[in-house]
Image: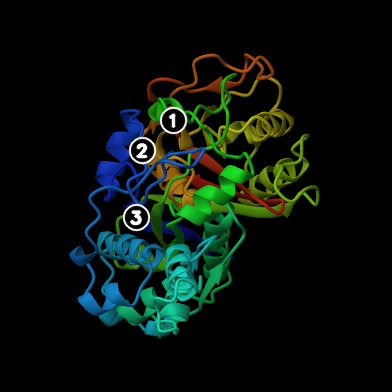
């Protein structure tokens, strides 16, 4: 099997629209949660989210690209452009069939769907739909538009596994490179779910926090007063590259990807397994593939959505895998970014990679009164970031439908 490294990163997030801004604000422990501005949410139970701010689609996109793409695709194109520029790849000197795109989105063009259907029902569309309705809506269009924009003709498809989506995308890209099916992949995920239907739907599930008075404090993983997740949006992009190819061209290598695994809980439509059975197996398989013992992992970026049921089950799984007194440090960065759904795993993978390069663990904010069910010997980094040597980092993502996806990165 070939080795796989990360040579480029790009991000559009509620904490910043570049890797440097995103990382700086994450290390500083800033919250991105605020009252929703995208639409009038005054009648909703939840009236806040973690929105991307100061996004200028024209920075990287032509007018026709903007007109023909949903916001989730625009986020994807921005993050992918940053990552390719960061990688230093000269695409013109490569066989375009050696470069693929595997991109994920849990919802696809939700805002396009809402707008077009609303116009039709209200009789504002003559009645007809825009010719761009379907192309803007379908979830695979982000991967398609990335390949079109940069002329990438290798393997190209989209994964959908709810909130595990972009971890799945990254895992697939990793495996295709290991098998020699491609030399480079643009991979990650994007989501633009801050719409009336998404917010209303998740609110009806009673999955979201209703702390409208203090949204900046609402996402509080493992805290006894947590009352649900905070919705986020954006994109994270990684350039995965075959190691010898990267070394031959003198690329800057951030880290090596050494393991990945997926399992299914086969338990419930929306809830994680209370004993973390699927999560346990995903972490064990990823470690086995990486040929690493559990005590080699220095940092775990947990799924940790700030929901009453989900948070403790992940800790139970961590104890089973890493022992009753694990030495690794854990943080729940959704406390700052909110939950980016299908893009969550990509932005959290970026935080893991930056933790490895900078030896800094970003914090869990807002966790003041730790749930008594969380063992005291579990080292959750709260309040402030922690300077600590990070050679190996793991990230977990779990999704509706029982999807579990775990990735492992290592200092090189």
Query: How is the structure coloured here?
Result: rainbow
Looking at the rendered structure, the secondary structure element under dot 1 is loop
Q: Which residue is mark 2?
A: 35
Q: Earlier in the sequence, mark 3 or mark 2?
A: 3
User: Label 2 to label 1, Cα distance in Å?
Assistant: 8 Å
Q: Are marks 2 and 1 in contact (CB under 8 Å)?
A: yes
Pointer 1: residues within 10 angstroms few (<14), some, or many (20+)?
some
Q: What numbered label is drawn on residue 9?
A: 3
Q: Position of residue 155 (x, y in %)?
A: 50, 78
What residue is shown at x 48% (from left), y 60% (from top)?
4
Pointer 2: residues within 10 angstroms few (<14), some, or many (20+)?
some
Q: Nearer the viewer, residue 157 or 296?
A: 157
Q: Earlier in the sequence, mark 2 or mark 1?
A: 2
Q: Position of residue 281 (x, y in %)?
A: 74, 45
Q: Nearer the viewer, residue 26 or 64?
A: 64
User: Label 3 to label 2, Cα distance in Å?
Assistant: 29 Å
Pointer 3: residues within 10 angstroms few (<14), some, or many (20+)?
many
What residue is shown at x 42% (from left), y 25% (from top)?
217
Q: Are marks 3 and 2 in contact (CB under 8 Å)?
A: no
Dot in front, 3 or 2: 2
């Amino acid at each position: 099997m070939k080795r796989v490294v990360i040579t480029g990163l790009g991000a559009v997030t509620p904490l910043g629209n570049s890797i440097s801004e995103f990382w700086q604000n994450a290390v500083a422990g800033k919250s991105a949660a605020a009252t929703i501005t995208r639409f009038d949410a005054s009648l909703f139970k939840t009236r806040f989210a973690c929105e991307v701010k100061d996004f200028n689609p024209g920075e990287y996109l032509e007018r026709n690209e903007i007109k023909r793409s949903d916001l989730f695709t625009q986020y994807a194109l921005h993050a992918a452009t940053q990552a390719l520029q960061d990688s230093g790849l000269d695409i013109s000197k490569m066989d375009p069939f050696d470069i693929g795109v595997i991109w994920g989105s849990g919802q696809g063009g939700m805002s396009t769907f809402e707008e077009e259907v609303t116009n039709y029902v209200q009789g504002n569309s003559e009645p007809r739909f825009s010719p761009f309705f379907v192309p803007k809506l379908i979830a695979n269009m982000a991967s398609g538009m990335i390949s079109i924009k940069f002329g990438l003709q290798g393997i190209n498809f989209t994964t959908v596994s709810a909130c595990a989506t972009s971890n799945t995308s990254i895992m697939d890209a990793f495996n295709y490179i290991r098998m020699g099916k491609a030399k480079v992949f643009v991979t990650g995920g994007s989501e633009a779910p801050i719409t009336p239907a998404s917010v209303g739907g998740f609110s009806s599930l009673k999955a979201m926090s209703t702390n409208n008075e203090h949204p900046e404090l609402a996402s509080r993983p493992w805290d006894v007063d947590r009352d649900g997740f905070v919705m986020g949006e954006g994109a994270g992009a990684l350039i995965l590259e075959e190691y010898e190819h990267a070394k031959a061209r003198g690329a800057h290598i951030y880290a090596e990807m050494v393991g990945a695994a997926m399992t299914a809980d086969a338990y419930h439509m929306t809830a994680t397994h209370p004993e973390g059975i699927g999560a346990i197996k995903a972490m064990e398989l990823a470690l086995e593939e990486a040929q690493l013992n559990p005590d080699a992992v220095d940092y775990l970026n947990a799924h940790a959505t700030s929901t009453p049921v989900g948070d403790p089950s992940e800790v139970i799984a961590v104890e089973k895998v890493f022992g009753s007194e694990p030495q690794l440090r854990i943080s729940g960065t959704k406390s700052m970014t909110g939950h980016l759904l299908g893009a969550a795993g990509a932005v959290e993978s970026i935080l893991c990679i930056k933790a490895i390069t900078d030896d800094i663990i970003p914090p869990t904010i807002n966790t003041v009164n730790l749930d008594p069910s969380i063992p005291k010997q579990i080292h959750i980094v709260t309040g402030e970031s922690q300077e600590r040597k990070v050679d190996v980092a793991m990230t977990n993502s779990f999704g509706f439908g029982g999807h579990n996806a775990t990735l492992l990165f290592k200092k090189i």
